[in-house]
Image (cartoon, grey):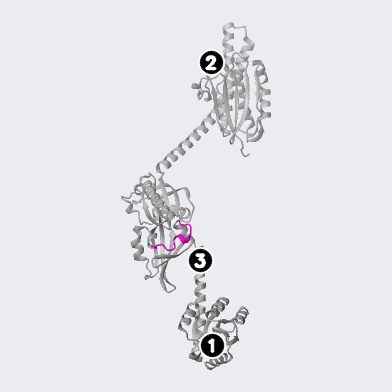
Amino acid sequence: MDPTRKLLVVEDNPSDLRQIIEMLHDSGSNMTVESVETQAAAIDRLAVADVDVMLLDLGLPDSQGLETFVRLRDAAPGVAVIVFTGSSDVEVAVRAVREGAQDFLVKDRVNGELLTQAIAYAIERKHAEQALRESEARFRTLAESSPLAIFVNREDKVVLANPAAAKLFGASSPDQLIGRSALDLFDPASRSLVRERIRVDSEEVPLVEVRIVRLDGTPVDVEATASPFLDQGVKAIQILLRDITERKAADEALRESETRFRTLAESSPLAIFVNRDDKVFLANPACVQLFGASSPDQLIGRSALDLFDPASRSLVRERIRVDSEEVPLVEVRIVRLDGTPVDVEATASPFLDQGVKAIQILLRDITERKAADEALRESTEDLLRSNTELEKFAYVASHDLQEPLRMVTNYTQLLQRRYQGKLGSDADEFIAYAVDGAARMRTLINELLAYSRVGTQGAPFVLTALDGLLDDVLQGLEVTLSEAGAVVTRDPLPEVWCDPTQIARVFQNLIANATKFHGTDPPKIHVGARLEGEEWVFSVKDNGIGIDPAYFDRIFVIFQRLHSRAEYEGTGMGLAICQRVVERHGGRVWVESKLGAGSTFHFTLPAELEE
């Protein structure tokens, strides 16, 4: 026997002690033996010594009978105790074993071999009992802290339940479950399955979905598994339950979502297909139509990549992946089943399809849009070319007209100076008409030149303080404003990036118009500015004669006038030039007015524009 094992003999008879030592020696045992003669000495010794097994005589000077055993057992619960006494009382032996003695030996009926075996078995059984207690303690600790509901069914009664089980069944404590019929805890519709699958004579039961009934009668769907075991020699079964109410609700929501998705996909005008493992897994009718198939079956199972034009596949492979985020719109080209290429706009959304990574791809046929874009591009190019040619023509025409006009003007003015009053009143009138017409022609040509030069000879944009620019404009109009008795008020104006000469022309034209088109009252003009988002909105407001809204668009067209020259002078170019300048600066111009109630002209300039 292992010499590290320690035996404590509690015996007050020296001859019996010698007999024990001799029997152990004769049997070949070399374990360490210590001895004491009284119960008190044994308790003291157990408190300080590491003892594996104890031989106890029930007849001691300070204690008699089983009371001696009980006291020493309680003093050292981890020590195996063998009662070794001279009494052969069977009733005492039975009681001793029931109280926890590992064996009951009668002194004159034991030899060395039997004693050695009894000691070895006692130590082994004690260790097994201790291991079982520790295992049970660990199980209880795990069960108490487990989020899973756990209860033990023995003889169709609940003998143990953890707090999670109490909570699942709506009990205030596990005690409300203990003693109940385990089968009655399940919904009647589930009991046959429970009776069939969860039995003490079965093997471990895999997960099965059943329904329990809470103490208040509420049914709850659970996932159950069970493990049969022996509980103190009696067949029992440990049952674990997991509440799957939320999971089933999520599954139902997922099924409903899938149904909605399929309904939407079936009715969607967009072509939709699902790519899983690089195979078409689902295709809606619009997709079937787009690819020229007769049914979804002609697409399902095909390589998704093969549906795209070879020139687009690298982009598709790079952008439309199951491990990517949602893919924004991208233009690619597909190939119909008959080989026809089709330009499409594609977007994709990765998702999990029954736990497998997949990607939903939406396609929109943009053949018509691209054709329209191409037609628009060609029209735009034609328009730009036409505008350029018109600008060149206007410039050349107006420039080339300057010289003959200058000659006509000079000679008519010469005639007027030399022959004024000498050829009669009719001649004077005719010459005056010619001089006036030549002057108006020169003004028209200059305005036409200014209009044509807005886009071709404009200066670079610079940061300009508009307060100072407006000061210069008002100074240039000082005589006109003074003669009309006009009063000009203003808001503080910002700094903006612009062509200062052109913007000065805008303010000059608008203020001059406000001064010109006034009623009986002297002109009152207000120049305003306000910031709206990323642009400045400027306004020139007057108290003049106003404009009929029917003519709002007409007034910005070149050479368009609403009044005769006899009523108001002008060429009909001023507002057209304003609009062209503002549009060159990325802004807009419009008017608000009522006939007889004044006008407010608005125009916008970007709040920030890089130089």
Height in image: 79 above or below 153? below
Q: Which comes before the other along the chain, label 2 or label 3?
A: 3
As drawn, is 86 to the left or to the right of 487?
left
Mark 2 to mark 3 CA distance (whole Å) = 102 Å
Q: Which comes before the other along the chain, label 2 or label 1?
A: 1
Estimate the x, y position of residue 211 in percent, counting from the top left.
38, 58
Question: Are the residues flagged by discs 2 and 1 in contact, CB closer than 8 Å?
Answer: no
SS at mark 2?
A: loop
- Kindly identify the amino acid type of the residue bearing the numbered disc 1: Met
Number of numbered discs: 3
Instruction: Kindly report the secondary structure that dominates the magenta region of the rendered protein.
Output: loop
Question: Are the residues flagged by discs 1 and 3 in contact, CB closer than 8 Å?
Answer: no
Estimate the x, y position of residue 276 in percent, counting from the top left.
41, 57
Height in image: 59 above or below 503? below
Height in image: 606 above or below 49? above
Mark number displayed over residue 1: 1
* Residue sitting at the far left: 294
Mark 1 to mark 3 CA distance (whole Å) = 37 Å
Residue at label 3?
142
SS at mark 3?
A: helix
* Magenta residues (range): 170-182
Q: In this orientation, which residue lies closer to the viewer: 5 or 439? A: 5
Q: Residue at x 62, y 22 (%)?
A: 511
Residue at label 2?
564
